[in-house]
Amino acid sequence: MNSNGADPERRSRRVRRLVATAVAIAATAGTVVGVTAGTAQAATTAGVDVSHYQGSINWTSVRNSGIEFAYIKATESTNYKDPQFNTNYVAAYNAGVIRGAYHFARPNASSGAVQANYLASNGGAWSADSRTLPAAVDLENNPSGAQCYGLSQTAMRNWIADFLNTYRSRTGRYAVIYTTTNWWNTCTGSYTGFWANHPLWLARWASAPGTLPAGAPVWSFWQYTSTGAVSGIAGNVDRDYWNGSRDRLVALANNTA
C-alpha cells in the first residue's frame, strides 16, 4: 500500500519485505502458530490496488486483461486525498471493474472516528450498485516512525474499533481490514475480536498466504505481490486475489453475501 510520501513509502516496503522474510523463516522452523491458508485456488478472482503512484491508468485495458476488482487509494490521515482517486474511481466503475476505496491509517494523528469520517466523506461511501465494495482501512507498519505508531496494544485495539464502528455507522457496511500478520499480532496483541464481521485483506508477498492474523478464519482478499504487471498500468502494481468467484464478490459489493 502507499503512504503519501515517496521516501516513507519505500521505507515501509523495505520493512515489509524484511518482516515477510523473517516470518517465512520462523514458519519453516515451526515457531509461528495460527491459522494457515493454502495457496490460491481456481475460484479466486484477480484484482489490483492502486494510488497516484501508478499514474494515468487505462481501466478498459485493465479490465480486458482479466482484472475484475480494484481497491483505490482515497485518503490518508485527515488531511490527504489521493489526487488520482476521483479519476480512477469513476473510470474503473465505467470499465466494469468492481472497486472500493482504501484509507491509509495514521493512528497517531487523530482518532479512529475522525479518520473514518474523513474517508466516508471523501470517496469511501457505499452504494448497492454491484460495483462498489465496502472501503478498506490499511493498517501496517508506520512508514515514518515506530511500528505501532507509539500506541499500546490496548490503545490500538480501541483506535481500530473506533474507526470500524464509525465507518459502519456512516455507511451501513463493515469495513475491510488490510494488514500483515506480523503487524496485527504485534500491534493489537493478537486480538481476535473483529473477524466475525470484517473481511481480512491479507498482505503477504509470497506464493502462499501463510499464517493469518490471530483469530482470522480465512482471508477474503490477498495482496500477493507488489511487483505485478497489468496491461493499462505502467510499471509495477500490487496484485491481489479475491477468495472466491466474481459472483461472490458482487454479493459482497451488494451486501448480500
Image (cartoon, rainbow, N blue to C red):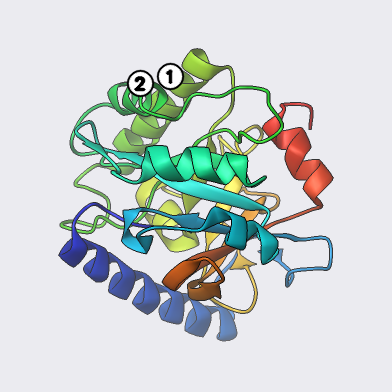
Q: Earlier in the sequence, mark 1 or mark 2?
A: 2
Which label sits on residue 117?
2
Spot occupied by residue 162 in the image (x, y as percentages of width and height): 39, 24
Q: Are marks 1 and 2 in contact (CB under 8 Å)?
A: yes
State which quadrant residue 66 falls in.
bottom right
- Residue 85 vertical placement versus 163 (above, below): below
Which label sits on residue 89?
none
Q: Amino acid at mark 1?
A: Thr
Spot occupied by residue 203 in the image (x, y as percentages of width and height): 50, 61
Q: Secondary structure at mark 2?
A: helix
Image quadrant containing the C terminus: top right
Spot occupied by residue 194 in the image (x, y as percentages of width and height): 56, 35
Q: Amino acid at mark 2?
A: Asn
Q: CA distance from mark 1 to mark 2?
A: 7 Å
- Residue 16 vertical placement versus 251 (above, below): below
In screen coordinates, is 99 left or right of 131? Answer: left
Residue tagged 1: 166
